Image: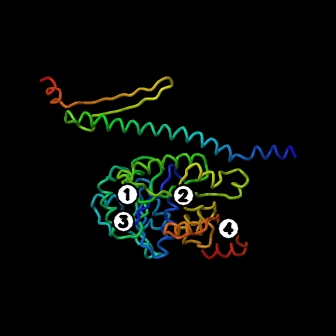
Amino acid sequence: MSLFSFFQKQRTTAPAARERLQILLAHERAEIGQSDLVAVLREEILAVIARHVPINRDKVKVKMDKRDQMSTLEVDIELPQQAGLLTAH
Amino acid sequence: MAEVMVVTSGKGGVGKTTSTAALGAALAQSGQKVVVVDFDVGLRNLDLVMGAERRVVYDLINVVQGDANLNQALIRDKRVDTLCLLPASQTRDKDNLTQDGVDRVMDQLRAQFDWVICDSPAGIERGATLAMRHADLAVVVTNPEVSSVRDSDRIIGLLDSKTLRAENGGRIEKHLLLTRYDPIRAERGDMLKVDDVLEILSIPLLGIVPESPEVLRASNLGTPVTLSDASSAPARAYADAAKRLMGQTVPMNVPSDKRGLLGKFFSRRAA
């Protein structure tokens, strides 16, 4: 009997698969939500700048880097030349 | 107005092309005008599974680029006359598939057919997002296996963000098609059960296609499995799924290949 149940335990792998998937996907769904955050940030930054200077949508880059200890948010905005002149006046 | 349906998955080799062919044939057999479109540019296979590989003259890229018109490229099925195929190109340059070009072709297809079924390439690259872009509903093909379920979860996320419907604030209808399912192994605890997969992915179930040698047999012969042996377990599963797509209520069960030895023998000889 004990031998039988030993084999049974070894064989039943579906519950493990289910548990691993649930943990993994909970984690992954949260991370993918964050990349949405970057997209939202990018749109809002674009909107604010566009209120003051004409801007090329492709020249705004927002990147989020996740490391062990900290995360960094990198915002790279390239303004057209006229924009610089306008603020100088 | 046509229904545009994308057959998609994250992981490759789970049965998208088989499912596209089988569902397309089943819908066409019930009198609907159906076109199956292969979006897997570079690695086309739908023509082979449909048994039309030697009839391809023009393909999707030719139509997108304006080298051929749509009717020149459409291949009418020899078995079911309301079924058409628009094959993919084998060209290596996938960038020939432009968004504007696809938009134009999809508009034309919508006008001509009741169902436009897009066979998506695997993965989350541009080809997959182009295939799902116009879809009103999606069939997510999944095996009861961890890697397939995980990748399906990613694809469901894309369906909620990268389709025209999602961009316009709408929602795309999503259905799960569980393929290569083995009820005996699931019962024994060796395979994720239907309920496990449904709970994890939480989209409605369209059908359960049991593991069966008939699927390989049908693709060897270039016949959609719903046409090759309509009484086989996978054929019945796909036929039921097609009925559900048309809004009929069909009880959900896992068909089995429980036929007498003699019956099996004769059906094999006949095919």
| Chain at numbered mark 3 | B
Query: Contact, CB < 8 Å: mark 1 with mark 2?
Result: no
The residue depicted at 55 percent of the width and 50 percent of the height is B201
Provide the secondary structure element on which disc 2 rests.
Answer: loop
Badge 4: few (under 14), some or many (20 or more) residues near its Cα, within 10 Å? some
| Chain at numbered mark 2 | B
Residue on which the image places disc 1: B134
What distance separates the C-alpha of mark 1 from that of mark 3?
25 Å
Instruction: Please determine if labels 1 and 3 lie on a single subunit.
Output: yes
Query: Contact, CB < 8 Å: mark 1 with mark 3?
Result: no
User: Disc 1 or disc 4, which is closer to the eye?
Assistant: 1
User: Disc 1 or disc 2, which is closer to the eye?
Assistant: 2
User: Disc 3 or disc 2, which is closer to the eye?
Assistant: 2
Residue on which the image places disc 2: B204
Q: What's the mark number on residue B84?
A: none
Q: Is residue A40 left or right of residue B234?
A: left
* Three-letter amino acid code at the position of disc 3: Val
| Chain at numbered mark 1 | B
Instruction: Please determine if labels 1 and 2 lie on a single subunit.
Output: yes
- Between A20 and B128, the one lying in front of the other is A20
Instruction: Please determine if labels 2 and 4 lie on a single subunit.
Output: yes
x and y percentages locating residue B68 in the rendered image: 29, 64
Residue on which the image places disc 3: B57
Which mark is first along the chain, 4 or 2?
Answer: 2
Which mark is first along the chain, 4 or 1?
Answer: 1
The residue depicted at 36 percent of the width and 65 percent of the height is B57
Which mark is first along the chain, 3 or 1?
Answer: 3
What distance separates the C-alpha of mark 1 from that of mark 2?
21 Å
* Three-letter amino acid code at the position of disc 2: Pro
